[in-house]
Amino acid sequence: MSLLENLEWRYATKKMNGKAVPQEKVDYILEAARLSPSSSGLQPYRVIVVTDPEIKEKMKPIAWDQSQITDASHILVFAAWENYTEEKIKAVFKETLTARGLPLDKMDAYRERLWGMYSQLPEEWHAHHAAKQAYIAFGTAIAAAAEQKVDATPMEGFDPEGLDALLGLKELGLKSAVVLPLGYRDEENDWLAGMKKFRTPKEEFIITSDELVEQ
Ligand SMILES: Cc1cc2nc3c(=O)[nH]c(=O)nc-3n(C[C@H](O)[C@H](O)[C@H](O)COP(=O)(O)O)c2cc1C
């Protein structure tokens, strides 16, 4: 199936059937997330994989009692750095340059300019910018899950502070951004299964430069 066919197939599954997703499919989806691009290649996020039934039970009320939390076999929590620091940025650049066999000072000017900019910005900007990078990986994971014929529910319906406390994310310098339960649809009991996909029509969604009003 092509990417477009897979994207047509997938939907935000409301009811899952409890069947476990094989580990190799979960690994594939996680690898797609890991390979996602991020601003300056910093990857300022981590993915927490929750399979423990007890933790999932505790997560459910934090996630507005959404049944997918306990019916999915794996819950991916995309958690972003709470801030950027010069040390964190230096560490990523050092690892990248080392992996590429390049001189460690090769990117100094770029890195200093980057930190010069980031260091001026408020902490909320840092957390928000890092979360935006996590969403790119989240989108890639959604597409990869569809390719693997694994159902997934993109989820912002949860209390981030409650989830951070449950998973001890603050201690890791992370804040939960978005959640992706993985499992299999319960066709019979999911009101959304088989519904027509609705999206903004192409003519509205795409605006060409010819249509822009001259300023
Ligand atoms: C960032 C994000 C957060 C969402 N949060 C939830 C959620 O908490 N619970 C839920 O059932 N669906 C959630 N959705 C699903 C959307 O409602 C759904 O993707 C959208 O209506 C398009 O439908 P489709 O994904 O079925 O094609 C979320 C989707 C995204 C992208």
Image: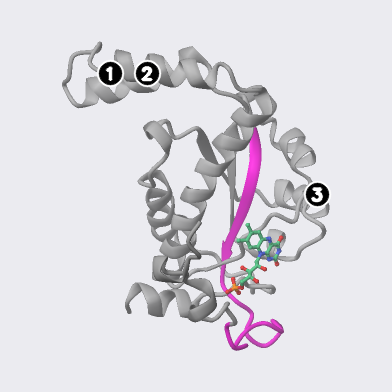
Mark 1 Cα-neighbour bin, 10 Å: few <14, some 14–19, many ≥20: some
For the residue marked with disc 3, what is the amino acid? Ile
Q: How is the image coloured?
A: one colour
Is 96 situated left or right of 10 in this image? Answer: left
x 25%, y 11%: residue: 105
- Work out which quarter of the rendered image holds the N terminus and state it: bottom left
Of residues 69 and 12, the one drawn nearer to the viewer in this rendering: 12
Question: Is 121 on the left or on the right of 10, as rendered?
Answer: right
Query: Is residue 161 placed above or below 16 in the rendered structure?
Result: above
User: Which mark identifies residue 111?
Assistant: 2
Q: Nearer the viewer, residue 136 or 160?
A: 136
**Which tag, 3 or 2, sits closer to the chain's start?**
3
Element type at marker 2? helix
Q: Residue at x 23, y 25 (%)?
A: 99
User: Residue 30 appears at what percent x and percent y?
Assistant: 43, 50
Vertical comparison of 82 with 131: above or below: above
Labels 2 and 1 touching (C-beta < 8 A):
yes
Q: Which mark is residue 86?
A: none
Q: Which residue is mark 1?
A: 107
Labels 1, 3: front one:
1
For label 1, the SS is: loop
Looking at the image, the residue that sits furthest to the left is 101
Q: Is mark 3 within 8 Å of ligand 1?
A: no
CA gap, disc 1 and disc 3: 42 Å
Which residue matches tag 3?
A: 62
Looking at marks 1 and 3 on the same chain, the residue that comes earlier in the sequence is marked by 3
Q: Which residues are magenta?
A: 175-197
- Distance Cα–Cα, label 2 vs label 1: 6 Å
The answer to whether the residue labelled 1 contacts the one labelled 3, judged by CB atoms less than 8 Å apart, is no
Q: Residue at x 44, y 64 (%)?
A: 143
